[in-house]
Amino acid sequence: MLVLLAGIFVVHIATVIMLFVSTIANVWMVGSSDYGTVSTGLWLLCNNTCGQLPVSSRDEASLKAVQAFMILSIIFSVIALVMFIVQLFTLEKGKRFYITGAIMLVCWMCILIGVSIYTARFTGRVPTSTNSHHGYCFILAWICFCFSFIISILYLVLRKK
């Protein structure tokens, strides 16, 4: 049981780190232009230097929603990690980690909503570039989506023995 708890803890920390990286880095979409590689993220447009991400007024609300949901997912994931540690030392034997699992399900939902909005509104849109494709941050966000769901289910069914 101790090995299972340690494994879940390590995967949870990895999920938090990957959420930070995917939200902060600006490589959600990558394309090529005459000047080299162009990448866009949730915050900036980067070519050789990074500048303000040009977003039409029609897409501005969608981008703000993606930013908000990704930040919320980080917050809920960190809260769930703290709650896991607290519950690990305060729960009696045989109890389940319901609170931690519920918080991770909220994190999972935030990732789902944020990445789904980005997929629907911004896929294939890299200004002044051709051959655009998804970058590593977009892929990391979907990996975090899977990990957070698995972790939340494990927390909900896990008994402390």
Image (cartoon, rainbow, N blue to C red):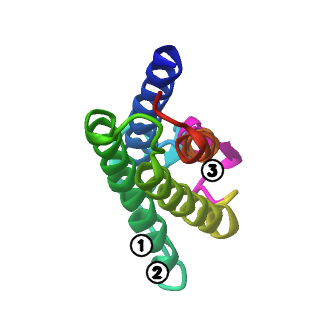
Is residue 134 magenta-colored? yes
Who is closer to the viewer here, 97 or 19? 97
Q: Quadrant of residue 17?
A: top left
Q: Residue at x 40, y 38 (%)?
A: 16
Is residue 90 magenta-colored? no
The amino acid marked with disc number 2 is Ala
Instruction: Inspect this view and state whether residue 32 appears.
Output: no
- Dot 2 falls on a residue whose secondary structure is helix
Magenta span of residues: 125-140
Question: Quick one: label 3, few (<14), some, or many (20+) residues within 10 Å?
Answer: some
Q: Which residue is mark 1?
A: 64
Instruction: Inspect this view and state whether residue 78 appears.
Output: yes
* Residue 75 place in picture, x, y as percent: 32, 54
The amino acid marked with disc number 1 is Lys
* Residue 155 place in picture, x, y as percent: 52, 42
- Residue at the outermost top position: 3
Q: Which mark is residue 61?
A: 2
Question: Quick one: label 2, few (<14), some, or many (20+) residues within 10 Å?
Answer: few
Please indicate whether residue 111 sits to the left or right of residue 71 in the image: right
Q: Quadrant of residue 42?
A: bottom left
Q: Residue at x 47, y 84 (%)?
A: 57
- Residue at the outermost right position: 131
Please state which of the two labelled residues, at mark 3 or mark 1, is closer to the viewer. 1
Between discs 2 and 3, the one toward the N terminus: 2
Question: Quick one: label 1, few (<14), some, or many (20+) residues within 10 Å?
Answer: some
Gap in Å between the C-alphas at discs 3 and 1? Answer: 23 Å
Q: Residue at x 41, y 34 (%)?
A: 93
Q: Which residue is mark 3?
A: 129
Who is closer to the viewer here, 152 or 44? 152
Who is closer to the viewer here, 104 or 125? 104
* Residue 54 place in picture, x, y as percent: 44, 67
Q: State yes or no: discs 1 and 2 in contact (Cβ < 8 Å).
A: yes
